Image (cartoon, rainbow, N blue to C red):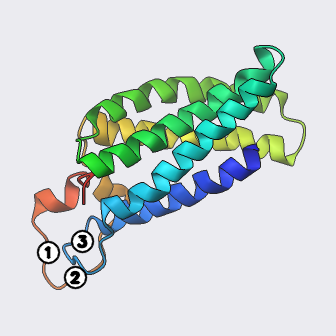
Amino acid sequence: MLPVFLVFVGASLFVNGIWMWRSTTMDSSIQLAGKDIAVVNLFTGLLGAVIITLILAKSPDTASAAPAAYIGLFALTYLWVGANQFTGASGTALGWFSLVVTGIALPIGIHSLSIARGTFDHWIAVSWFAWAGLWFLFFLTLGLGRPLIRATAPPRHRATAPPRHRATAPPRWSQ
């Protein structure tokens, strides 16, 4: 079940990255609407919730239920992002939640690396560190309002420079 979920996590990360990158341009013809992107996020979050339910239903003990907790970090994040995109909420609370998740993801990455035996195990461990970095960027961008989108998603070349506040502000969830 995890590989299926990771496919949708990857697709969501890609689509969200394109959405944020295109939000830095003033050319509305290439911007993606937040509500369009919300569909991908909500589907990924709901898929995660279903997988969590299946894992918990089959888990004989708490140790075998741990993957459900890890998937829950992603599922709640994607559900929250999707909800924010539909409602137009600022995402500040999601940013602070992302700081907590960063603090959970780093030890998971360390533990995963310490028990890794094969290529997939090492890939998962490295992925946890990458995800922790992405959640931390969510914290900086949404929780603290740091203007990181321009640095991480530079705008395309254009004839006229956009207003400074537009190029550096986080995208509004309802765009």
Q: Are discs 2 and 1 less than 8 Å apart at CB?
A: yes
Percent of width and height locating residue 162: 13, 71
Amino acid at the residue labelled 3? Thr
Task: Identify the mark at residue 158; answer none if there is no mark.
Answer: 2
**Along the polypeptide, which appears first: circle 2 or circle 3?**
3
Task: Identify the mark at residue 25; answer none if there is no mark.
Answer: 3
Q: Are discs 1 and 3 less than 8 Å apart at CB?
A: no
Which element carries disc 1, helix, strand or loop? loop
Figure quadrant of residue 160: bottom left
Residue at the extreme right of the image, as rendered: 117
Viewer-proximal residue among 8 and 139 = 8
Question: Mark 2 or 3, which is nearer the eye?
Answer: 3
Circle 1 sits on which residue?
Answer: 161
Percent of width and height locating residue 75: 54, 38
Q: Are discs 2 and 3 less than 8 Å apart at CB?
A: yes
Percent of width and height locating residue 19: 37, 63
Which element carries disc 3, helix, strand or loop? loop
Left or right: 161 as drawn, with respect to 48? left
Q: Residues within 10 Å of mark 3 (few under 14, many from 20)?
A: many
